[in-house]
Image (cartoon, helix red, strand yellow):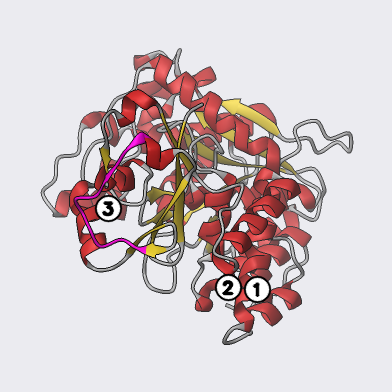
Amino acid sequence: MTYHPKSDFIAVMMERGYLSDCTDYQGLDEALMTPGQSAYIGFDATATSLHVGSLIQIMMLRWFQKTGHKPITLMGGGTTKVGDPSFRADERPLLTDAQIDDNIAGIKKVFDAYIDYDSGTGNAAMMLNNAEWLDDLNYLTFLRDIGRHFSVNRMLSFESVKSRLDREQSLSFLEFNYMILQAYDFLELNRRYGCVLQMGGSDQWGNIVNGIDLTRRVLDHEIYGLTSPLLTTSDGKKMGKSQNGAIWLNGDLLSPYEFWQFWRNTTDADVGRFLKLYTELPVDECNRLGALEGSEVNAAKVILANEVTTLLHGAEAAAAAEATAREVFEKGGIGDDLPTLALSAADVGDGISIVQLIVKSGLAKSGKDAKRLIAENGAKIDDQPLTDAGLMIDAAALASPIKLSAGKKRHALVQLNG
């Protein structure tokens, strides 16, 4: 569509590629001409950390604040007890209250790196938990006051539900309630804090529209929804996943070096797009870097990795990761920041197989994968080809750290404690 935005926020969203759809471009754009508006994104606490797949939403909240408004990060302490069924083939495992609280504590650590909750400029962000209003709902009152506004026929037509039913996969009544609870979140945030906008990935479109309809029916307030595209890499892979699993945002689950390396390994075709979405470099510079070809694009990938890692982990961590990568890749050495597997003498005993070490260091998911890696000449030990899957490593061999490599880009150190 051709639309020329007036507000800084919508201009950024459109120019940098964040925008998939909006319930009312012009109405939202006009509303955001007034500084200090509130918008929220909800994050269910299904793990102790968010992963890279959530980073586009976090950046949207960051830009919302940078353009003069007040972001709300809504922790799903209540909705996590139900579980979002959107585009899932099965029901999420039910978590205890203690598990949910632990997950929220882990997730909160990331937001402080991106969003200012103590701003003295009047647009400080808020972090809220929907358990505050969901935990104590009276079921019959909720059904009478809120449930009557929802048509089951319409709910069944939403793609997130319809796709599950079309595949004849079970959808529990518990999960079916999720969209009502998320809609109620928007109503409560508008009623309590004047929140005018809900944002999310495009898979949340149906849930967002439900919240808008409910708020208009109950409060007769004009509010808006905006979604971002569900990102895949240029080779069709889901953003946030790698060979070794999720790319977590918390440093205790994924080291800053491994996080940096994920971005350094971006495919050439994605560099310009990712620079616009995940960094704050000017758009013209993102386009220039993204247009580089051949060996020159590698410099752009280093810039991407440094910029994204600096936002999350700080400039020192980014610099250390780059130094380690240079030491490992360009000089064939052992960098200070390389992921390390520390073993005790008891772990090693009379000897530990190289296959076990490859698995324990995270370079392969299973012994079978490790043996395949060796058989296909993809494994190295101290930069030398590893050909013997039956090799045993004893404590003497670990007197100094050994370097294991899987392919050209993944490395780990193995050393003895003490």
Give the amino acid type for the residue marked by disc 3 in the picture.
Answer: Ser
Which tag is nearer the camera, tag 2 or tag 3?
Answer: 2
Q: Is residue 190 above or below residue 346?
A: below
The residue closer to the viewer here, 2 or 357, is 357
The residue closer to the viewer here, 397 or 187, is 397
Q: Residues within 10 Å of mark 3 (few under 14, many from 20)?
A: few
**Residue 392 falls within the magenta-colored stretch:** yes
SS category of the residue bearing label 1: helix
Q: CA distance from mark 2 to mark 1?
A: 7 Å
- Determine the residue located farthest toward the right in the rendered image: 121
Residue at the spot 59% in from the left edge and 87% down from the top edge: 293
Q: Earlier in the sequence, mark 2 or mark 1?
A: 2
SS category of the residue bearing label 3: helix
The magenta stretch spans which residues?
Answer: 385-395
Residue at the spot 40% in from the left edge and 54% down from the top edge: 241
Q: Circle 3 is placed at which residue position?
A: 157
Which of the image's four quarters has the N terminus?
bottom right
Q: Earlier in the sequence, mark 2 or mark 3?
A: 3
Q: Is residue 230 visible?
A: no
Q: Circle 2 is placed at which residue position?
A: 271
Q: CA distance from mark 2 to mark 3?
A: 37 Å
Give the amino acid type for the residue marked by disc 1 in the picture.
Answer: Ala
Q: Is residue 112 visible?
A: yes
SS category of the residue bearing label 2: helix
Q: Circle 1 is placed at which residue position?
A: 300
Q: Are marks 2 and 1 in contact (CB under 8 Å)?
A: yes
Residue 366 on image: x %, y %:
23, 47
Q: CA distance from mark 1 to mark 3?
A: 44 Å
Residue at the spot 32% in from the left edge and 38% down from the top edge: 394
Q: Are marks 2 and 3 in contact (CB under 8 Å)?
A: no
